[in-house]
Image (cartoon, rainbow, N blue to C red):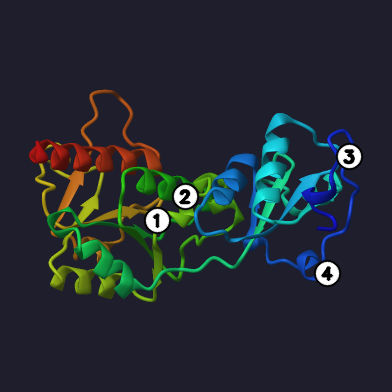
Amino acid sequence: MAGSTGKRGKNVPHKPRKPRGETERQDHDRLIPGFHAVRETLNQPKNTLREIWIAEGKQSVRTEEILRVAQSKNIPVYFKKKSELYDIFKNISHQGVVGITQPFAYSDLQQVLRRSLQNGASALLLAADHITDPGNLGALIRTAAFFGAHGLILPRDRSAGVTAATMKRASGTHHQLPIARVTNLGRTLDELSKKGFWIIGAAGEADSSIYDFDWDRPVVLVLGGEQKGISPSIRKRCHQLVGIPSPGRVESLNLSVAGGTILSEICRQRNFRKV
């Protein structure tokens, strides 16, 4: 396999080779930067990586791991000049390792809905109301996947999508969490409400605590954008607004931390009732 790990001797450095022409013109949204993100993507049951780039001269145990797994899965590896990688990822730490993936495939909303409802009262979806920072979205994806959410719903407009920065923060978990994009989030929440979901919005000023609310029901947890929170049109569709009580002086939490706190309480309540 020319240009890949197949012909690499134990102590013989991999000769640099320019990636194929189509790869030079890659949409940056298909580039997964960073060791952890590439490793997690490599370890997914369904391989979505087409090739891997590694910075010339980069030698480490972690690099050897990437090379070994890539060879076992017949994924070509190409070495690029460090300056090229830094030109592409001016504001993103790539650690000298980049994966080239297939275009991210958003899930069909109806399919996500059906899979979620198979869990009955434990059905759990998240809806992101215009979260614009890709890093925040990636962290939320990783948090939601960790706590076993069944899907994430994003609006098409005025919202971050699954980009290189998102995948970097998600560290491969964007393959574990079905993510759907919808034209109108409000109408989608109306539809989910008719299907039996409770639309629960997270708001810092809410009177109800996440620890007092009964989460043993099909839930869509709505999280608002970084600056303005949940928009008025989405608030009107929420059956309940809940907040995280703070014993300290800090008024708010980072988006993914707040989401993780609420998801942790949902799991705690539901697991307690199973005992």
Pointer 4 with pointer 2, Cβ within 8 A: no
The answer to whether one can see residue 227 in this image is yes
Q: Secondary structure at mark 1?
A: loop
Among the two numbered marks 4 and 1 on one chain, the one whose residue lies closer to the N terminus: 4
Residue receiving disc 1:
177
- Residue 24 numbered tag: none
Pointer 2 with pointer 1, Cβ within 8 A: yes
Pointer 3 with pointer 2, Cβ within 8 A: no
Q: Amino acid at mark 1?
A: Leu
59 sits left or right of 155 in the view: right
Q: Secondary structure at mark 4?
A: helix
CA separation in Å, label 4 and label 1: 32 Å
CA separation in Å, label 4 and label 3: 23 Å
The image position of residue 37, as x and y in percent, is 58, 45
In depth, the one of 260 and 121 nearer the eye is 121
Q: Amino acid at mark 3?
A: Pro
Residue receiving disc 2:
173
In depth, the one of 194 and 118 nearer the eye is 118
Residue receiving disc 3:
13
Q: Secondary structure at mark 2?
A: helix
Q: Amino acid at mark 2?
A: Thr
CA separation in Å, label 3 and label 2: 32 Å
Identify the residue shown where x is 38% and y is 73%: 108
The image position of residue 36, as x and y in percent, is 59, 40
Q: Amino acid at mark 4?
A: Gly
Q: Nearer the viewer, mark 1 or mark 3?
A: 3
Identify the residue shown where x is 40% and y is 60%: 130
Identify the residue shown where x is 13% and y is 56%: 121
Which image quadrant for residue 218?
bottom left
Residue receiving disc 4:
21
72 sits left or right of 239 in the view: right
